[in-house]
Image (spheres, rainbow, N blue to C red):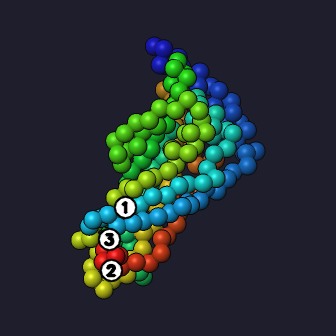
Amino acid sequence: MFNALTDRLIATIISIGSLFFPFLESIEPNFSNIQFNTVGSAVVLSMHLDNCYTDQLNQVISSGKTVKIFFQSELFRTKAKNPDHTQNFYHTVRYNLLENQYEVYFSETDRRRLFSDISLVHKYFTSVSNYQVLKSEDLKSGQDYYIRLTAYLENITFIGEDSDLDLMLFWNNKKPSVDTEVFNSSIFLH
């Protein structure tokens, strides 16, 4: 009962706020600090997504509803239209109104971290550290490859509401995406 009441209250607040969404200035996030390194017979990825928070998105994050960001890593052969290998993972953040703290979950490590300050949420929610994106056997000798990284926010649904809140409105309805430098199987020889 308390959860349903809380969801209705949050839905009402955000619904009223959604009247102002056409007047929001959208931002366009971008990937930065992209690093991929070899660890044994695997390639691991580290990166950060910058310029992705607005005051309104911070309010949604602090509302108590779970906010989920999806990441996708696709391995392409140069000049290929379809990826050879795709990996998906996600992060969630939920603010606990009673304990006054944010819980961030990282699917790639199956770990949770608690933060009392939203600035720490900003730092970790959109960062990936040493995530294994492929193994040496995924690469064919003599073939050049690149990795395409993409991210997007999942819509939020409230109990008793007929429509979702499209969080991608805060990102100008564009999924940030970037391609890494071209590489081949020789990266495992270093």
Q: In this view, which residue lies farthest toward the right?
A: 23
**How far apart in space, not on screen, are marks 2 and 3 (Cα)?**
18 Å
Q: For this rendering, which residue is in front, 136 or 95?
A: 136
Say which residue appears at 27% left-offset and 82% top-offset. 141
Q: Nearer the viewer, residue 171 or 122?
A: 122
Residue 9 visible, this orientation: yes
Task: Residue type at mark 3: give it.
Answer: Asp
The residue lying at 59 percent from left, 59 percent from top is 30
Q: Earlier in the sequence, mark 2 or mark 3?
A: 3
Question: Compared to 169, does 28 lie above or below?
Answer: below
Using the rendered view, name the quadrant where residue 1 is placed: top left
Task: Measuring from the top left, give residue 62's x and y in whole percent.
Answer: 59, 31
Q: Are marks 2 and 3 in contact (CB under 8 Å)?
A: no
Mark sitting on residue 149: none
Q: Which mark is residue 84?
A: 3
In the displayed structure, would residue 17 be above or below residue 129? above
Q: Of marks 2 and 1, which one's residue comes earlier in the chain? A: 1
- Local packing at callout 3 (Cα closer than 10 Å; few below 14, some 14-19, many 20+) is few
Residue underneath mark 2: 186
Question: Measured along the vertical axis of the image, is residue 180 above or below residue 26?
Answer: below
Element assignment for label 3: loop
Amino acid type, callout 2: Ser
**44 or 16, nearer to the observer:** 44
Find the distance from the CA under tag 3 to the CA under tag 1.
Answer: 17 Å
Q: Which quadrant of the rendered structure holds the C terminus?
A: bottom left
> Which numbered disc, 3 or 1, marks the residue that appears first in the sequence?
1
Lateral position of residue 98 relative to residue 186, left or right? right
Task: Tell me if mark 1 has few (under 14), some (14-19) or many (20+) residues whose alpha carbon lies within 10 angstroms of its own.
Answer: some
Tell me the SS state at disc 2. helix
Look at mark 1 in the image and give the residue it sits on.
44
Front: mark 2 or 3: 2
